[in-house]
Amino acid sequence: MLRLIGDFLQAIFGVTLPEQAAAGAYLVDDLYNLVFLISIIGFFGLMGVMTFFIIRYHRSNNDKSAYIPHSALAETIWTVVPTIIFVGIAVWGLWAFFKAEKIPQDAMRIGVTGKQWMWTFTYHEDDRNRSGSEFKTPHMMYLPVDTPIVLEMTATDVLHSFYVPSFRVKRDTVPGMTTKVTFTPTKEGDFKIFCTEFCGTDHSRMRGTVRVVSKERFAAWKARELKEANITDPVELGSRIYANNCATCHNVGSERKIGPGFGGLFGKKREFSNAESVVADEEYIRESILNPNVKKVKGYENAVMNAFGGILSDEDIRHVTEFIKTLK
Ligand SMILES: [Cu+2]
């Protein structure tokens, strides 16, 4: 019924909600359509009565207005009716909230990390218990259709907020805290992820995609990723660290992006705006990753790199250094 009213209103007023791609999406939409309907009725009711009064009580008809000190009936009506409507909306909202927040026992648990300016997703061999070997994917979250999901989310730098309009799912991610959000995707396809908490200069580009696929395809994808995750070649591992952490700012060639390109960097003499020049060796790359501001590359005075201490382990740094060494 509300769905119908919603479709009708949206057809007339041209406001469309994103498609519903999760089981609980109707909870949000029904409430939205109800409030929308009440607003429309309120608006036209108010304007109608006002127009009627303007004509009916125009000065040319009634020079002197009647003296009405108060009306107990009118006051009771305009107190009780809105109270019932607003309390009704609040109760409905609470009911929908608790229903949407209830995490199913057997939900598949996936880690989400927000950082300036990307989303990273962590999967485990055993998703129900988050145990066994794990792997991460940047930007793209794969999900099996018709499976209850719970996202366990955090941030590493500032506040971000994870938002998938088609799922009607939105929750802040907070450094040092785990926030959870649950939903069950019901449609296969790609859906947009936005960061909806202003988090710095590239906030508007902090997007991602949820790709909902069949359960079989998901299982095959996950098995492949798990196998990939067990690769031990340092250059190969380093290239992954690069793709997940550095590619937004550094090219593998020598062209500049936000930072200098990595191509031909190793062994080259570097000039800085705030330090003596040095030759790029392992120690220099390590320092650039952990304390980027100690030596600012000439020509990049106004660009910043975030420090990776606490994000990359010593081993990660060794791997990414091995990878940089191979770039000509
Ligand atoms: Cu953000």
Image (cartoon, helix red, strand yellow):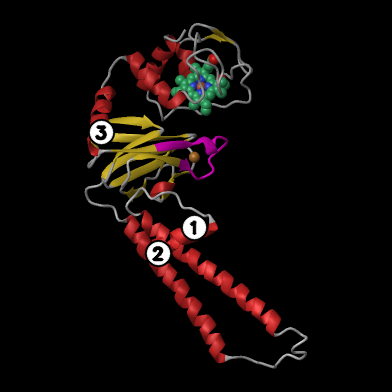
Give the mark, 3 or 2, whose residue is nearer the N terminus.
2
Q: Residues within 10 Å of mark 1 (few under 14, many from 20)?
A: some
Mark 1 to mark 2 CA distance (whole Å) = 12 Å
In front: 136, or 213?
A: 213
Q: Is residue 1 magenta?
A: no
In the image, taking residue 220 as reference, residue 25 lies left or right, namely right
Tell me the SS state at disc 2. Answer: helix
The amino acid at mark 2 is Leu
**Disc 1 designates what residue?**
10
Could you tell me which secondary element the residue under label 1 belongs to?
Answer: helix
Q: Compare marks 1 and 2 and give the one earlier in the sequence.
A: 2
- Residue range of the region highlighted in magenta in the rendering: 194-209
Q: CA distance from mark 1 to mark 3?
A: 36 Å
Picture quadrant of residue 71: bottom right
Task: Decide which of tag 1 and tag 3 comes sooner along the chain.
Answer: 1
Task: Report if residue 289 is visible in the image.
Answer: no
Kindly check if marks 3 and 2 are in contact, taking CB atoms under 8 A apart as contact.
no
Residue 238 visible: yes
Marks 3, 2: nearer the viewer:
2
Q: Is residue 323 above or below residue 8?
A: above
Residue that mark 2 sits on: 2
Side of 251 where 135 appears, left or right: left
Name the residue located 53 percent from the left edge and 71 percent from the top edge.
Answer: 41
Name the residue that disc number 3 marks: 217
Q: Quadrant of residue 90?
A: bottom left
